[in-house]
Image (cartoon, rainbow, N blue to C red):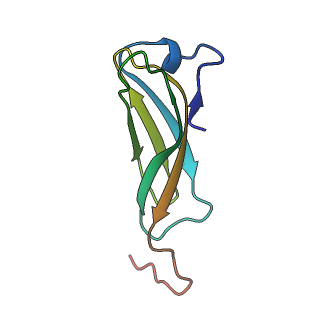
Amino acid sequence: MVFSDFEDGGEMWTGTGLRERRCKVDFSEGFARPPAVQVSPSLWDMDTKAAIRAELVAENITRNGFEIVFRTWSDSRAARLRAAWMAIGELPYADDWDVD
């Protein structure tokens, strides 16, 4: 769950203007290099009285994790959002050399 703001009057539900929510994700095992990450909404609960304006992206991607970032603006109201993600990349190999 990235956020659930409708129950307690959170800013995504009651606010206006530019709003942002970040959710840190840690990989269970690190990658050899930062992977390609795809995020998508798996639960999208939005008010339909105003236009639905939103952006869902992965930012700050490292070998060990990333941040799911949800943004909305103007008078759009987001009650809650759950995101699914997939990371694809090279895993470290036990015989890899780290030569400086």
Residue 92 in the image: state x and y as whole percent. Answer: 51, 76
Left or right, 14 with respect to 34, comes to: right
Task: Say which residue appears at 42% left-offset and 15% top-offset.
Answer: 49
Q: Is residue 64 above or below residue 10?
A: below
Which residue is located at x 38 percent, y 17 percent? 50
- Where is residue 64 drawn, in percent x and y? 52, 58
Front in this rendered view, residue 87 or 42: 42
* Residue farthest right in this picture: 7
Looking at this view, is 64 or 21 the one in front?
Answer: 21
- Residue 15 place in picture, x, y as percent: 46, 12
Q: Is residue 96 left or right of residue 74?
A: right
Residue 33, given in percent of the width and then of the height, sits at 42, 67
- Residue depicted at x 65% and y 15%: 8
Measured along the vertical axis of the image, is residue 16 above or below residue 63? Answer: above
Q: Name the residue rendered at 46%, 47% in the picture.
A: 40
Above or below residue 25? Residue 30 is below
- Quadrant of the rendering where the N terminus is positioned: top right
Q: Nearer the viewer, residue 46 or 65?
A: 46
Q: Is residue 93 above or below residue 83?
A: below
Q: How many marks?
A: 0
The residue positioned farthest toward the bottom in the image shown: 95
Outermost residue to the front: 48
- 28 or 15: nearer the eye? 15
- Image quarter where the C terminus lies is bottom left
